[in-house]
Amino acid sequence: MIPAASFRARARSPRFRVFSFLSLALSLTPSAWPGPKSGSPKPPPAIVDPGSQRLDLPFLHTGVHLSTGKRAYWRYEMVDFQVDAAGGVLNPSSDPVLEIRIFRNGRPSLGLPGKDACLLRWDPNLQAWHGRWPIPWNPELGEYQARLARPAALSEGSEHSYFAGPGLTRTVRVLEGRWLADCGFTLKGRRPSMLPPGFSVITLEPGSSGYRFPGPEGGPRKSQNAFAWARFMGADAFWQCALQTDVQRGTKPADLPWGQHDLAMMQQYASEAASQGVAFGAYMLTFLVGGDYKRTDYEFTLSYDRRSGSLQPIRFISMADSKRQREITAALKMLAATPGVSYIGLDYVRANTGGLEFTDEFLNDFDLEVPEDLRRAGVQERRLWLGRHLAYDQDKRLHDLWDWWRAHRVALVLKGMLEEAKVTQPVWVFSLGWKQGHQHGQDPRMLIDAGISFNSPMFYEADQDQYPVMLSDWRHYLGGTGGVLVFGQCVDSKLLHPRPGFNGPEEHLQRQMEVLSELSPVTDRIAFFWHDLNRAVAGGRGGEGMREWALAGAASFSRLREAAGALPLSLSVTSEGVVPSLSGTVKVRNISSARLDKVRVEDVWTPGLGEMTPRSWWVRDLEPGESRDLTFTVAITDRYVRPRFRAAATPERMLAFKASAWHDPAWPRSDIMFSYWKDGRSPAGGAPVGPDAAAAPCGPAKAPAAAGSRSPTPDPDRDPGADAAAEPAKDADTGKDSAQ
């Protein structure tokens, strides 16, 4: 029974006439909405399972109807709720704000910070309560339930406070665990396109080389050598940046919006791809303008400038610019119609630090408040107000909502362009690595739902403290939800921030191995890209040359394929010695489930190495799980280092080898691995990464000072025009009983 004192207090409530009989009925129903008994303390708020609330009382939902705008939502959308009231159960005057809680499988589902629940406010135009709920980052897909909390009088229930804007809150008082109505909705998501196991890519951005590249074995510079490097590294695909808007002095009108020379090279590469045995992809820089961007007539996004305290346009084109959207759509159609283009890519699909031109839309969608004087002010004043708060206010709720809304807007724009272009090839987006690009208006899952086939996160620039944090953040974000991701590292020592004792190529490999170890368990398929060929031509801003960077990428591709079961062999290398010669061991291991009758192991020449004895081996009858140790000696020669890096260069030599199952159609790829010989340090080893092995670091090894003779293979960094061949291989045949 309900105590008399409680009845007297409730009689003063305007809802007494509606709910008194209901309260009496429920007090006689022990299984439903249990309340405190007379003389007992009030229990803490609890969420009651929905199954215990479905009472067969015809007046339970009288006049209250909760609905969503549609049945299913993509991850880039907002769920819009509406409550229609008739019969006086809810009153706009006494209940101006309603609270909806979201549940998944009977458990509360948390939203973004500040949006754990959805608040609905009375809209006199709709004659209903209305509100929107942003779908949290990468949610679990499936069925959800929304429940409308029962409002409470001032003397009842609990008061909940919610974020309503910078420094502002909105409150609602509800009876805990008691619901007036509910409805269901579905969160849906597209599946990314599956890539082949061990899929690997090299990329090319326009640079000072002018599309004239040295070959892996020297020879004249020519554009087709891009494919030669892809084959040398064992890449499945070659992706070229074919379209960019770059405004320089002397830029011709014909080169706007897209540079014609890059487009002409795209046509050439696309026509040659099939004969070169490498899949070709072309990508564009979408919303970024290089050079003197202010000379164009685009609408640029607005960002808050701390130094001047004002709004400033930056070189990213606004997502509101319909002209740019038309240009991108036309480019998508053109690439899709180009024979030989197997993949189409989009870069800079983001707002960077901008987006403030959308201030009013952002405030309206999230029903956020502004100070009274700004309601009557112009839109520029509100943009400036929001920009200041984003620059100086550390409230995570504001930043998360702003990041989410911009990613939502990017996804909507991208979806519209892809739907109009009707592209049939797989489409990828280069997305940012830090915080999944959220701080710049990107979200990998939203981009998939918008229509792309897979994401290519750029894991550049993070230093040694930041990189583990980034990996952990991605692991948490993915959370076992799968997906297809092509992770990339750049050919740039400055951006890689090598750890002590490592050079750029070593750090490149090590970081990809950490990606493989940490993120492959929470994805459906991991792939790698190596970025890019022009950076390698320039030396990657370090003392190591183009061939060394290429072999680092090749080794990462090999480890990736080993883990994917796409290679039967795994190599590791150790070395020691002093000038003028070194000695070492190559360990070859059969990681497949079948015997390999004939395996070819051979060295891969790198700068600063002379004669190697032997140059290659035949390994016969290698059983599953079996390893063989192959020993070698190698002479030391001069190693070319670009002048600007000579002062800081350390005595080091890369020792690289490759192995293949000889003429076995089941295993067409070679396994490649390397180690570095560095003065006074232990060898790299390069332990294998397979399905049952964790990624091992590619560490440094002993190295002598350089001295000696002419290299047996031309160095593409030193003499890219030379056309000389490698010396004939000197083989060693190792049978099962004679292997070292």
Image (spheres, rainbow, N blue to C red):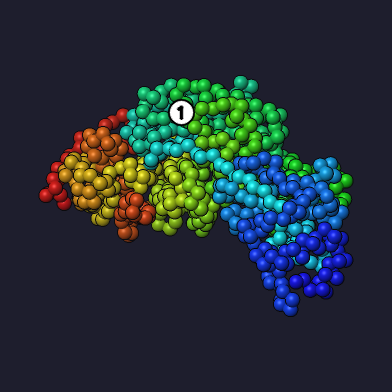
The image position of residue 298, as x and y in percent, is 70, 31
Residue 338 vs 516, above or below: the answer is above
Amino acid carrying mark 1 in the image: Ser
User: Which residue shows up at 55% across the image and 31% down it?
Assistant: 284
Residue 334 vs 350, above or below: the answer is above
State left or right for residue 12 relative to residue 29: right
The image position of residue 449, as x and y in percent, is 57, 39
Q: Is residue 698 visible?
A: yes
The image position of residue 102, as x and y in percent, is 65, 53
The image position of residue 509, as x and y in percent, is 40, 48
Name the residue that disc number 1 marks: 342
User: Which residue shows up at 39% across the image and 24% down it?
Assistant: 274
Q: Is residue 383 visible?
A: no
Q: Nearer the viewer, residue 267 or 199?
A: 199
User: Which residue shows up at 82% across the image and 70% down it?
Assistant: 7
Graded by Cα atoms within 10 Å as few (under 14), some (14 to 19) or many (20 or more), the crowding at tag 1 reads many
| Quadrant housing residue 28 | bottom right
Figure quadrant of the N terminus: bottom right
User: Which residue shows up at 51% across the image and 50% down it?
Assistant: 478
